[in-house]
Every structure is written in C-alpha cells, then in structure tokens.
Amino acid sequence: MRTVRLAQPADFGAWRVRARALAAARVRPEDILWQVGGDDGDLFGAGADDSVEADAPARTLNVPRGFIDLAAQAICHSDPERFGLLYRLLLRLQDDPHLFRVATDPDVHRAEAMARAVRRDLHKMTAFVRFREVRDETGAEAFVAWFEPEHFIVERVASFFVKRFSSMRWSILTPSRSLHWDGATLHLAAGATRADAPDGDAIEVHWRTYYTNIFNPARLKIKAMKAEMPMKYWRNLPEAGLISPLIAGAPRRAREMIMNDPTPAPERHVRQTRRHPVQEPTPLDTLPRSLVEAAAAARDCARCGLCRHATQTVFGEGPLDAPVMFVGEQPGDHEDLAGRPFVGPAGRLFDRTLADAGIDRSRAYVTNAVKHFKFSLRGKRRIHQKPDAGEVQACRFWLGLERDFVKPRLIVSLGATALHALTGHAATLSSLRGRDLVLDDGARLIATVHPSYLLRLPDEATRVRESARFLADMKRILALAPVMRRADAAA
C-alpha cells in the first residue's frame, strides 16, 4: 500500500505529478491511499510509502482533450474519494482513449457530476458573497465577508474577486481557507469561523430597504427563486430576514397592486410625449403603394421613441429588382448624419469585403432592421446602443414593406439583431451561421456577423481569422445568386 499525501484538499498540481508517476509504474488504484495534509494514516497501512517519485515518467501518458480541465474541477469536490476516482480514470484512459464518449460509464458519470457540482458552487459563491465594512486598527476602511462553500473552491474563485474588487481591501473567510487582498497582493490563510466575521454594517439598512422596494409580488416564483438561491445560503445574506415575510405577504400586495390606480408618469415624460407624440401604426388602407412612398412615409416615423433623438430616418437603398438584400442592425453615427445606410467605418469594411468576394454592391439592396440611430451621449460623442426587442418589432413594419416591394431571392442578415428581425425568433447567430435557411416568403437566408463586429475584435490574429470567415460567407452569395458577380471579377 502506498500513501500519497497532498498539501491541500484541491492541490491539483501535486496530484497530477504524483498520479503521472504512479500511472507510469502501473500502480493499481486499490493500492494507493490518498491523504491531505496531516491526515492520519490508514490503520492497516503498515509499510505505507510516502516517497512516491515525482520525476517525469519514462512512459508517455495520453489523455483526451478535456480530461485535464475536468480533473482540475472535480478535484475541488468535497468527496474524499475524488483523488482515487480521477486516478482510476487516468489509468483506464491509457487502455481506452475513447472512454469519455461513454456517458453511462459509472466513473465518467461520477467525475462529470463532481465537476458540475464544483462549477455550481463557484457560481453561487460569486453571486452570494456579501461584504461588510469594517475599520482596522488605523481606522482605514476594509471589507470582510463570510461564506460557506460546499467544496474546496476558494483558491479557484480567488481571481474573480481580485479582478472584480481590485480597488478594495477585503477578506473572504470560509471554514477551510481564507482570502485576504490588500490592494496589491492576495494572501491565502487558514480557515476561520463565523464568529470571526462581522454581523453587519450601516449600509445594510439601505440595502434591505432597496430589496424590499424592488420585490415584485406579482412576479414571485418561489420554486425558481429557491432553485437559483437555495435556502442554505439565506442565513449569510443581509436580506434573508426579509424573504419569508415578503413571500407571505405577496398575495395581498399583488391584489393591492391590481386594485390601485396606475402610477402617473413623471412630468418630464408627459412633456416629452406632448412634443413628440408616438404615432399608431399606419392603418392598412393607407399603406404605401411603392418603395418610394414607403421611404417618404418613413421619414416621419414615430413608431418608437428612437425618432426623438436621431437626426433622421435612414431608409434602405438599392435597385427595386435587387436579387439580394443585406440587412444590418441600425444606422450608426455616420449614417445618421448622411441619411444613407453603411457609409461609416463598418460600411467601408463591408464594401471592401464585397469587392474581395467579387460582388457588385450596386446590384444589392442595403438596409437595416431599425431605421433610427440609438445612442448614448459620452461627452460630445454618440456611443452606439443596441436596440431593444420593442424597437426592433416596431421597425419590422418598414422592413416588411422593403421585402414586399424588392422581393429579393436572397437575404443576408448582418448580425444577431437583423437575424431576429427577419426570423421573428431568438435563435443564436452561431447556431444558424453556415446553414441553408429559408424565410416564410421563400427567400433564402444567409446569417453572418455585422462588419462592426470585426472592427471591435481585440487582437490581430482573431481579426484575420474572423475576417476570412466573413469573406467566405460573402462568397456563398455568388453560389446562390451568380447575377451579383462583378463584371470585372474572375469567375
């Protein structure tokens, strides 16, 4: 029997070194006793060997992609048999490299369940840690939190809190390990007790008041709430004492909300509405009879609130018989000022890519799912904001008219917003990109990214790779609509 001692309960690095040496020697799992720190040895472990060689084994060990990540997560589980389970999997993978494809295998199933439990515990810790303000011996501000994780995740979650609260001095105390951040260096320390953490601070009064006021009894779903915030975490949350009374009083408060008069709108909203009244959708008997009439009618569109701040409506442009229609998200700053779609930086990249693909843009109809520029002010700059579902829905009226008048055989959606506006459902762009799609009117659909996505990519390698994918998407157009080929482009 060999005894292997690890310094910490989640010491993956040490486990990996020892496991490799043992597996290279083909030591059987049942002949190994895994221990942590100064745990007592096995009563029947006479002759146990602590001197497991950590040198690189002569025999090469191979494991499939993903095993290392799974083992690094599962080793944080509180199950004392985790080390032996992972070692047994390591040995079995040498004889059966496809073992992880057998989801019903007991060892595989158990290891994956451990990893899921650890990931869930990590998520709960990042969600339910509550800091309380304290003062040190010098009177300086610091923050202390108490948390009781189910598994040994403290070291694994430390980077999240360092990044999130880098400007604070804080400590997170748990029964197994504690974290202390002084603003520059992270220190790991021994575990603590609940008595070592503060009971509360002054700000919690305001937090409980806020929590009470945002609680909506009409939307209460107790099972969903308990699934997301299990009751075992309640005892360490400042708002926990409010939860039961709020649940008990929810039916009464919901009835009162129904019986009460609606809350009047703020006066500033009333003034804004008077200056810019929102029009009702155009009645069916006054629908535009041509694309020119539709563009003229859209200039006065007030179907949503975006018209109040945008410079002008930016309608689509292109030939009436265009075989291909490109649909983007919304006009940007340059388009809002020029009154034409795709004339800014993203539009110039779009033009270059079409040219590289051999496509004649002048034969295409180009438009956006939303016709007004949505932005927020940052100093004197207007920063793009993504339109919400209501704004996209309001503008589907105009997009529908464009499709009816142009009748393109092929539509290319540029970005997720355009895809949702065309399909009417919330399928992800990644799930539909590259697939053969057909819309309700029989038009073919190609789903790809918006050119602005390429401009926002952080590094050159990613930008080159994604630009090549975008160009490949554009080249698919010629396979479906050869008439779009430029006269000077090679066949």
Image (cartoon, rainbow, N blue to C red):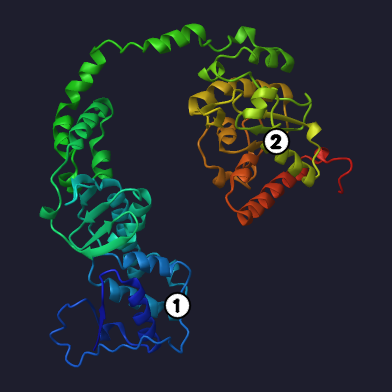
Viewed as shown, does residue 26 lie left or right of 287?
left
Question: Label 1, label 2: how many angstroms apart (C-alpha)?
Answer: 53 Å
Instruction: Give how far across and how far down residue 24 sits, in percent.
Output: 40, 87
The correct choice, above or below, for 53 with respect to 140 in the image is below
Q: Which residue is mark 2?
A: 347
Q: Which residue is mark 1?
A: 96
Q: Residues within 10 Å of mark 1 (few under 14, many from 20)?
A: few
- In the image, what residue occupies the spot 38% across and 10% down? 267
Q: Nearer the viewer, residue 303 or 424?
A: 303
**Residue 430: x and y, percent?**
56, 46
Q: Secondary structure at mark 2?
A: helix
> What percent of the width, then of the height, locates residue 72?
36, 67
Looking at the image, can residue 231 be seen? no
Q: Are marks 1 and 2 in contact (CB under 8 Å)?
A: no
Q: Residue at x 80, y 32 (%)?
A: 362
What's under tag 1, amino acid-wise? Asp
Query: Which is more N-terminal, label 2 or label 1?
Result: 1
